[in-house]
Amino acid sequence: MSMDSAANDAAESTSLPAVRNYYPCSHCSKRFAYRCGLRNHMNIHTGKFMCSECGKCCHSGNDLARHMRSHSGEKPFECPVCSKRFAESCERVKHSRIHTGEKPYKCTMCDKAFSRSSHRNDHMRIHTGYKPYKCPMCDKSFCQSGSLYSHKRHMHSNKRP
């Protein structure tokens, strides 16, 4: 997901506060806080930026170019340290933290820090007690998907490590 579409998705909501004038899509139930968000969204309905390979419609030309790399396998972004290549520049930036040791995402409840925001968000479940990963075979729940996977492998299958 691109930064543009992430911003649009963040601005779109079905539970928007009543204090703003929101822009509804005339084709679906989505609403947008900003006119530019609606304009980008409409490109999906009109097919302005449609993939010639699979028919997926994108918000913008940049999103379409990024999507096309999924078909071509092109990886134009190279790590200057180890030469690993990436289809998206943001993935190269995340990867570069392996080399620098940078951990910009801090836990607000303890001293842990993380190189990726998603890792910090997963960690926060330890503090909140939120366990969204439920075992379909018993009543146990887990805060990490890997813990559910291990549980199912150890408790509900014949496979052992």
Image: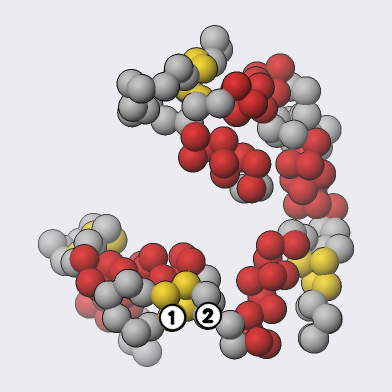
Mark 1: which secondary structure?
strand
Q: Would you place residue 111 above or below residue 38 in this image?
A: below
**Is residue 142 shown to the viewer in this render?**
no
Residue at 68 percent across and 66 percent down: it is: 91
Mark seen at residue 103: 2
Of residue 102 and residue 62, the one placed in the foreground of this image is 102
Residue at 79 percent across and 77 percent down: it is: 79
Of residue 68 and residue 122, the one placed in the foreground of this image is 122
Amino acid at pointer 1 = Ala
Residue 119: image quadrant is bottom left
Residue 6: image quadrant is top right
- Percent across and percent down for residue 29 are 45, 18
- Percent across and percent down for residue 94 are 64, 71
Residue at 28 percent across and 61 percent down: it is: 133
Amino acid at pointer 2 = Lys
- Percent across and percent down for residue 10 are 49, 40
According to the picture, the residue beneath numbered tag 1 turns out to be: 113
Q: Is residue 70 left or right of residue 126?
A: right
Neighbour tally class for label 2: few under 14, some 14-19, many 20 plus, Cα within 10 Å = some
Q: Is residue 5 left or right of residue 61?
A: left
Q: Would you place residue 152 above or below residue 87 in this image?
A: below
